[in-house]
Structure formats: C-alpha cells, structure tokens
Amino acid sequence: MIKKIYFIFNNNILQILFSILFFLFIPFCYADNINDDDNNNRRLLHNNAELLGWISISSGLIANVPFILYVRVKKLSVKRLGGGDSLTRNLALEHRPIINFHTALNLIGFFTGIFHGILLVRGIDFISISLAIVITTLTVSGILIRFTKLRIVNQLNRIIHTHIILSTLLVILVILHVSSSY
Amino acid sequence: MKFLFSKFVWSIFIIFIMMIFSNSQFLTLITVFSQGDESSKGGGFGIQERERARIHAGNDSQIVNDDRFGIQERERARIHAGNDSQQFFNNDLTRIILIVTIIVIIGVGSYALYKIYLIRRKSKQSKLKWY
C-alpha cells in the first residue's frame, strides 16, 4: 500500500493536483445561476470562499509540518548514525515522494488561497496583501527550486525558500489574518 | 553580485508594474482601503464604509423589490460601520505590517544574493589556487 502511494506521487503529481483543483471548483459552479436570489448567492459564495481559506491553511499545515519533521529527523540520523546506516539510507530513499507530496499540497493550498482572495477581494486589507506577498514569494521560490536547472538560481531560491524568518512571518500573518477576519 | 542584484531588482520592479497597470480594479481598491477610516463627526461612517455603502446602493437600485432589499443593505452597512469603529487592527498598524513584510522580503532576498556572491568568490579563489 505504501509502495503504491509512493508510485503515485512519483509519477502522477500533476494529475492529482488538477483533479483536486477540479473537485474544489464544483461548489462554485451552481453559484453562477443568475435566476437565483442575489442575497442567497452572495451568502453562499461568501461561505464557500471562507471554506477555501480554511482548506488553504489545512493543506499548508499538512504539507509543511511532516516535511519539516522529516528533514530534521534525516539530518539528525546523518549526524548521529552516519550516512551508511540503514535507517539513514531508507530516509534518503523516501526523499522524492515526500518532496512531491510537499509540493503538491502546497500548490493546492496556494491556488485555493488565490481563489479565496479573489472571491473576497472587496474585504482586502494590508494584512491580506502582506500574506499574499509572502505566500507568493515562498511558492515561486519553491517552484524555481523544483523546476530550474541553473545551479545559481537553485541555490538562491533554496536560501530564500528555507529561510526561517519568512516561514515565521508567514505563520504570524496567517494568525493575524484569521483573527482580524473574525 | 552587481549583475545579479540589478537583474533581481529589475525583475521585481517589472512584475510589480505589470500587476498594477493590468488591473485597474486592484488600484481602486488599494486607493480606497489605504485611506484612513476615521469616522466623520456625528456619524459612524468612515471612508471605507461610505465606499461600501455606495457599492451596495448601486446594487440596491438594480433590485426590483427596493423596499425589502435596499433597507436591509443600508441597515447592514450601519452595523458594519459600528463594528469598524471597534476594530482591533486599525489601518496604521496594518500599514506597518505591510511595510515590515516588504522590508523582510527584500532583506531575505539581499541576504540570499550576498550568500551566492560569497560562494562564487570562494569557488573562484579555490580555482585560482589550483592553477
């Protein structure tokens, strides 16, 4: 079962991503019906837009927390046990599917966050703008690490993407955004 | 480093300009919501609430049953205005948060460029030593 999951994440990451995004679009399809009452439409769209925000936060948490733990455990095993140990080698083998999982869920979180922002653009404030800027910076740097072949661009984006200050700022801004919305 | 830095700065600048000029609604929103929301004398409506009320009034005029829907929207706007005055995050604080965010991102980008410069300098020095 675990091997099957690894196989899926090694090969079909884009298909999974697009299928999940497609399913997320379904609640919004019936909101375009112009014969419905405008007030109900607006409320429905607002509730769905809020739900998208929570989906974005949840996918971000699921994508990042296990990944950070995995990286820490891997570094610790290399430091304590050495590179030749079987545990270290097994952890190294799991790197690719875990990175794919991290990338896929973060991209889902990013796009749902974008749609959440577009749908609620009338309530925009400076905290939302700051959050959008930080999330976009992290996502673009992550994408460039993943898909670029130039070593220097890779190194630059790796430093930006893994910097503790940006991650801390992101967490703080998410907390501020949620608390200012209620 | 100069070469890398100018490319980095130029690309950020061009992307920012493209975003602003391709989306006039974005500009209008920024203009409206960047202004202070101090309430006027004798009323609870700041500038943001007046803009919201104007948009709602525009929507109201397109509804057939004006009595039911128009009054509800105006009442909602009045309640929002009352809530606005009690908000914890006023515009000054959130403006500072945005400025801090931009400074942090520029700082991290500059730090990354500096690290790349050091790495390149070390690799050039080690190559010279070999020859």
Image (tube, coloured by chain):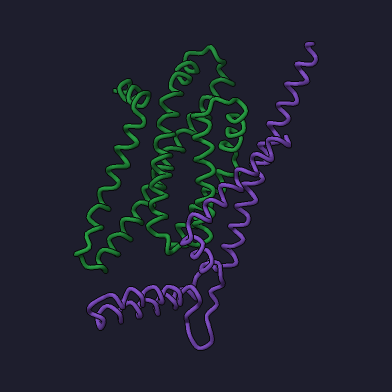
Chain colours: A green, B purple
Nearest to the observer: residue A105 or residue A40:
A40
Residue B88 in sight from this viewpoint: no
Nearest to the observer: residue B54 or residue A100:
B54
Q: Residue at x 53, y 41 (%)?
A: A138
Task: Give the vertical position of B109 relative to A72 (above or below).
Answer: below
Q: Residue at x 61, y 52 (%)?
A: B102
Q: Residue furthest bottom?
A: B42
The mark tally for this picture is 0
Q: Residue furthest left?
A: A35
Q: Residue at x 58, y 34 (%)?
A: A157
Nearest to the observer: residue A153 or residue B61:
B61
Residue B83 in sight from this viewpoint: yes
Quarter-wise, where is residue A98 in the image?
top left
Question: Residue A71's x, y, as percent?
Answer: 51, 29
Task: Give the vertical position of A41 relative to B75 (above or below).
Answer: above
Relative placement, left or right, of B99 versus B87 is: right
Question: Residue B51's x, y, as percent?
Answer: 45, 74
Relative placement, left or right, of B12 versus A43 is: right
Quarter-wise, where is residue A18 in the image?
top left
For the C terminus of chain A, the quadrant is bottom left
Question: Residue B124's x, y, as percent?
Answer: 75, 21
Question: Residue A113's x, y, as percent?
Answer: 41, 49
Task: Give the vertical position of B41 relative to A105 (above or below).
Answer: below
For the N terminus of chain A, the quadrant is top left
Q: Residue at x 39, y 73 (%)?
A: B55
